[in-house]
Image: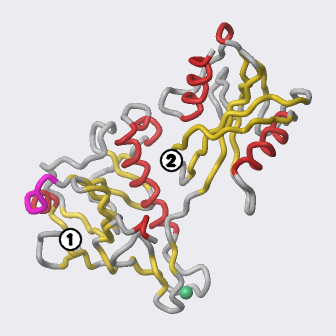
Amino acid sequence: MAGRAAWSVLDRAAQSYQLPGFGKSCDMVLLREYQNRAQKVQYILAYGGRIIANQTEIDPFYPSSCRQKLRVEAAYRLNEALELLILSELPDRAVQWLDLRGLLAQVDEALFVLYARAAQISVWYDRHRFCGRCGAQLESDATELAKNCSQCGLSVYPRISPCIIVLVTDGERCLLAHNPRFPKGRFSTLAGFIEAGETAEMAVAREVEEEVGIRVRNIRYAKSQSWPFPHSLMLGFFAEYAGGELVPDGDEITEAGWFTRDNLPDLPPPFAISRYLIDRFLESL
Ligand SMILES: [Zn+2]
């Protein structure tokens, strides 16, 4: 599990939080003191699997001027300067929840990764409190990003759900589709979860055929993107049209069509991997 070792877990048990550089365990943290001792460490606060926004809602980093005491259940280091604090109860003041989608639209890729990590750890922490095998309580591992069962020893790691997302092309035109959950008039690439036992390429071929009824060939990997809604990993592909009639499945896809540079519909926002695939294709023409 070398890849997971870079994650530093600062807390072992609920209600006992070892503050880095603080020298004692406690379950109440005065954030201002913590900020001073930890020196330049900022924090993201989460409760119940969701991230708490500060006043601006753009920036979830908690202000250093905060004097409120918070009950911290666990803490995870995201990098040298940023930690995720998972609260066991909400602060007294009214909280606003972070609009993660809105935030992700405004940040660069490095910050996107940090927010995606924070969001996914928060959700995982909240949804994995008891062992799926024996039902005993799970405890945070001291050295890696995991929780362990105190009774049977089962370890659980943050769940990551791989999906494929694919732009199907045919010469100078590309296939874009409308999902009922999209805003009106928005068209995007096709996407779907990889099923147990499938390769990513098999999932591409299956999803395209299921959603719009056509066959594809020359499936090529492009890039990936963490998609924390709530824990997807999007694997982006290009594929070429190989035959069949375009027929939307009427469920996941209600409308689909071939588009050229000159008749593009409303596209996904620039930070989404679907838009990356579309833009790369348009640039290649
Ligand atoms: Zn167990």
Where ligand 1 lies, by quadrant?
bottom right
Residue 92 found in image quarter? bottom left
Residue found 47% across the figure and 38% down from its top: 101
227 to the left or right of 258: left
Residue found 27% across the figure and 40% down from its top: 55
Residue 238 found in image quarter? top right
The answer to whether residue 118 is above or below residue 30 is above
Give the magenta-colored segment's residue range: 36-40
Residue 14 found in image quarter? bottom left
Q: For the view shown, which residue lies furthest in the bottom direction?
A: 151
The answer to whether residue 199 is above or below residue 251 is below
User: Viewer-nearest of labels 2 and 1?
Assistant: 2
Which numbered dot is residue 226?
Answer: 2
Residue 38 falls inside the magenta stretch: yes
Task: Give how far across and how far down residue 197 sits, in percent.
Answer: 74, 62
Amino acid found under the numbered disc labelled 2: Ser
Disc 1 marks which residue? Answer: 28
Determine whether the residue tagged by mark 2 lies in a helix, strand or loop.
Answer: strand
182 to the left or right of 118: right
Q: For the view shown, which residue lies furthest in the top direction?
A: 262
Count neighbours of disc 2 (C-alpha within 10 A) and say few if under 14, some if 14 to 19, many if 20 or more.
Answer: many
Residue nearest the observer in this picture, 36 or 232: 232
The answer to whether residue 109 is above or below residue 43 is above
Task: Give how far across and how far down residue 13 sits, in percent.
Answer: 33, 80
